[in-house]
Image (cartoon, coloured by chain):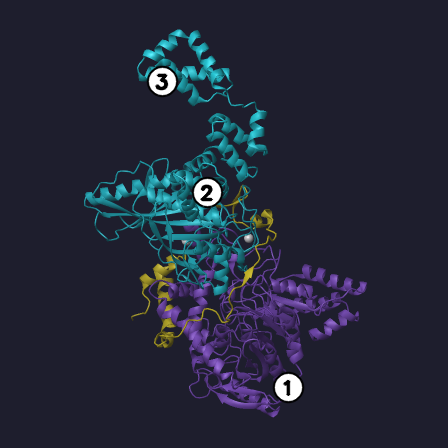
Chain colours: A cyan, B yellow, C purple
Amino acid sequence: MSPHEPTLPDEWELVVGLEVHVELATRTKLFCGCANEFSTDPNTNVCPVCLGLPGSLPVMNGKAVDYAMKLGRALGCEVHGSVMARKNYFYPDMAKDYQTTQYDKPTSMDGELVLSDGAVVGIERAHIEEDAGKTTHIGGGGRINDAMFSLVDYNRAGVPLVEVVSRPDIRTIDHAKAYVNELRDILLAIEVSDAKMEEGSMRVDANVSVRPVGSEELRTRCELKNINSVRSMGRAIEYEAQRHVDLYNSGEAPRQETRHWDEDGGRSTPGRSKEDADDYRYFQEPDLVPLEPSAADVAAIDASLPVLPAARRARLADLSGVGPDVLSTVVERGQDGLALDAIEAGADADKVLTRLQNDVAVDDWSNLTPPLLAALIRMETSGELTATQAKQVLSDMVESGGDPATIASGRGFEAMESNELEGLVDQLIADNPDEWIRFTSGDDGEQKKMQGFFTGQIMKATNGQADGRAIAQLLAAKGS
Amino acid sequence: MSERITRDEVIHVARLARLDLSDAEIDEFAHQMSDILDHAADIEALDVGDIEPTSHPLPMVNVFRADERRPSLDRDEVLGVAPAEQDGQFRVPPILGEER
Amino acid sequence: MSARSIAADVASGARSAASVLDEHLARVREREEEIHAFNLVTEEKARSQADAVDAAVAAGDPVGPLAGVPLALKDNMCTRGIPTTCSSKILEGWRPPYDATVVSRLADAGAVFVGKTNLDEFAMGSSTENSAFGPTRNPLDTGRVPGGSSGGSAAAVAANFAPLAIGSDTGGSIRQPAAFCGIVGMKPTYGAVSRYGLIAFGSSLDQFGPFATDVADAAALYDVIAGHDPLDSTSITDFTPNAVDHLSRGVQGLRVGVVRELSGGAGSVEGLSADVLARTNEAVEALAAAGAIVEEVSVPSATLGLSAYYIVAPAEASSNLARYDGVRYGLRVDAPTTGEMNTATRTAGFGAEVKRRIMLGTYALSAGYYDAFYGKALKVRTMMLRDFASVYENFDVLITPTAPTTAFPFGERSSDPMTMYVNDVCTIPSNLTGHPGISVPFGVGDDGLPVGVQVLAPALADGLTFQVAAVLEAAANAGGAT
Ligand SMILES: [Mg+2]
Ligand SMILES: [Zn+2]
């Protein structure tokens, strides 16, 4: 985990629960046939249903329910009969002035998420609901409370969401980040969402409280909204926890409220407390019928689930010594199958994984087959190709296919004979006596600088084809 | 006269429902709503402990539509009936309250 | 002239749809100012529909079962491009961008839409006095109400502005005005007719249904509007409407129960007037004479219907009517903030009865009261479903009066909500259970105004209600009703 774990005073413990809204990647919205797609042209993906026009009625998108159940099962939840409910409150971006969501009978309950370091976060529920439209505040710098007016676009209204509610099991900011990353990896693996925080297809609200270390109580929490990235979430939680500690230390206590994270200002500000906000008058949605998946339906969902990211990372971890970041990246990109087969074909596991992580950060790597990748890694480990050369050959392979030996010879990457390289080094030393003296008699810093100089010159002379390690060895030998 | 529903409750409910009531209306509603709920005392008094609620007269479940596109509306038609519009959107006065 | 003969004449070319329309519009011009059945007469639309029917007939193209039949639509049905108001100021001027499924079916059947009919605002009422655009008068006695909430539709048929009309029934809003206006009105099984495009009042109770001057016309209209609609999740699948097929089956051997609690028997609800009960008894006798096996039966929970209904319907309404907030369509009263604008708009746009029910429903759903009221009412629905299910093990249909009295004078009940609500006591149970019910005229009361008798049947037995109603109608026409 990252070395930066912020500075909550020793005697305080952080308690965090996360509510993550996930947009499902269906073709159409939850209750109507309008396109579920991002559009910059406002109010074009709208119809009587998602505009909540009088007389319109919702009809449930079966695909959205399948996706929600898939997510529930991937989170280890019980998936059972559920009903839709109306959550009643006024807001202009909500076309019916109620949200169709789930209340006392959600689709998924009681699961857990295992983080990459083995920590377990409980999942309380994962329920289906509809998204709201989008409000833009005009004038007064775009801030809600001093806007001159607002504009409402309902393109997003009715987009299917699953709200995943964790238990307040998270104790560190790193775990909060790991939770979000893990959830995103799962969503991508089961292909139910784009899971892009920056585009809003995955939105995180954080419930934050603190308590004295050793205490088991749950103190007053604040719900932080408007978190736009994993990094922003970390900052927001850190700020909010410290705010609570400061309040307690000064003999006060936080109020339970929703707070708005101000990323630019680096602080949270209170949402205007609405005294009626908690009286949502939930009742069963009479325009929809209950969802009653059979045992066979749930079994079919289970059978359709792929091996999940945690298990995939574990398989790679068994075979290699690379860190969790590399494992996550490779699994996230779906390159782990390729890696496993290449390792199976005899390539060095760590090399395979680091090459994939560093040099195959592209969307389309379909030209790269396991035998070809294994062949390349073997050429690199055997010294046939320098690191630089291997990287270039790999890039060609990804770009246009082909086997590494052919590409290497086509590029003129014959392994440079060592006496050829030695000749070049001797020549350079003769041409640059001052630099050579500084290399041989300078301090560590000076020596390093001059090694850089000589290496650079040789790379220039060889068009970058020399092996950096061999140059270093030659210089060291001649200077000693 | 003690009513089942107090003026304060009427005021609270009116706020939830976004209705502005005059003093006379508050009294009238307190009285009439109390009357109606007095009449509902017959069901309030029922012992219905283990009876399942019926939200819906028909025992239907699992009604789904295919994830297929249907035509959306023409924006000009949608905004043509809007009380106020601007730049292809519905225009409203400033919203005081939580940002979403 | 019946809708059936108009359709037959138009289809055969014996009469033109345009001339049929002219005849009806002439009557509208004559009496509409007095009656106020319509919020809007859609003459232009009607003419183009009639012309299209005539063109199809001339070209030898097939025409629908309602070819050229003038028809009135309740003004809570969405009609594309045609103002749809629910008799509320809050929707004044709104033109829906789509048609209700029932509207499309009727257009496809060749019906000619003469206008949008008046109703109690958002269908909340039993007299059509609660319209923002003024009351409708009963064509049989203009000093009296036509009933409601579909009073405009009932009046339009009773005044022969159109032989057919559509109404909606949440607690009796088709059957009670049919009874008051001396015509036939039917509420289908919940889910038999699509609610898509029906502006919601109580979503778990609302159904569209037919008005006609006789049972056979009502059955023909029912058969056009009923059937599955994929746009309504609560629409019954695999349901074939075949009301017309039932018309001539008679009642020989049919087991008919007279609901004691709704017909003046032991433990009956109060307020049922003697003349109405007398006509109901005569109707029962007429069925017995026609070969039915008649018996009194008890449905204990039927008396709880009124209380449960006046919790459930307002609760659903309070949510359904939240969307009238001044943001997207309809009325807006400007104010400095959106919240204040919402409040100002709703305060100015809704009438007193609508506000009362929104308040009641909001209260019934709010934290702390849910279990005592809404939760209980849902359990009462379960009790009623069980009671009716066990009764229907031994009976094919049930008989009650449609309404406690004949049409009452204007203003008589508008001051006290509870006395108005009692109007619905006989019709409400079938909305709570989702069962079908029909009102058929059977004689007149002491005041000379028509009495309606109600036939109830179990879910999906819609055809049976027409079957029994046809026998009652024949008996009434033969003088079996005094
Ligand atoms: Mg939610
Ligand atoms: Zn839509």
Closest to the camera, between mark 1 and mark 3, is 3
Any part of residue C141 in sight: no
- Residue C203 is tagged as none
As shown in the figure, which amino acid type bears the numbered disc 1? Gly
Marks 1, 2 in one chain: no
Q: Which SS class for mark 1?
A: loop
Residue linked to disc 1:
C250
Q: Quadrant of the N terminus of chain C?
A: bottom right
Marks 1, 3 in one chain: no
Q: List x then y, in percent, for residue C71.
A: 65, 68
Q: Residues within 10 Å of mark 1 (few under 14, many from 20)?
A: some
Residue linked to disc 3:
A448
Q: Nearer the viewer, residue A478 or A429?
A: A478
Q: Whole-Å distance between the Cαs marked 1 and 2?
A: 72 Å
As shown in the figure, which amino acid type bears the numbered disc 3? Lys
Question: Outermost residue toward the right?
Answer: C59
| Residue C5 vertical placement versus B83 (above, below) | below
Closest to the camera, between mark 3 and mark 2, is 3
- With C29 as the anchor, is C235 left or right in this view? left
Q: Nearer the viewer, residue A1 or A327?
A: A327
Snapshot quadrant of residue C155: bottom right
Q: List x then y, in percent, for residue A121.
A: 34, 51
Subunit of label 2: A
Q: Nearer the viewer, residue C336 or A257?
A: A257
Q: Residues within 10 Å of mark 2 (few under 14, many from 20)?
A: many
Subunit of label 1: C
Q: Which residue is drawn at the image coordinates 74% and 61% (left, top)?
A: C52
Residue linked to disc 2:
A332
Q: Which SS class for mark 2?
A: helix
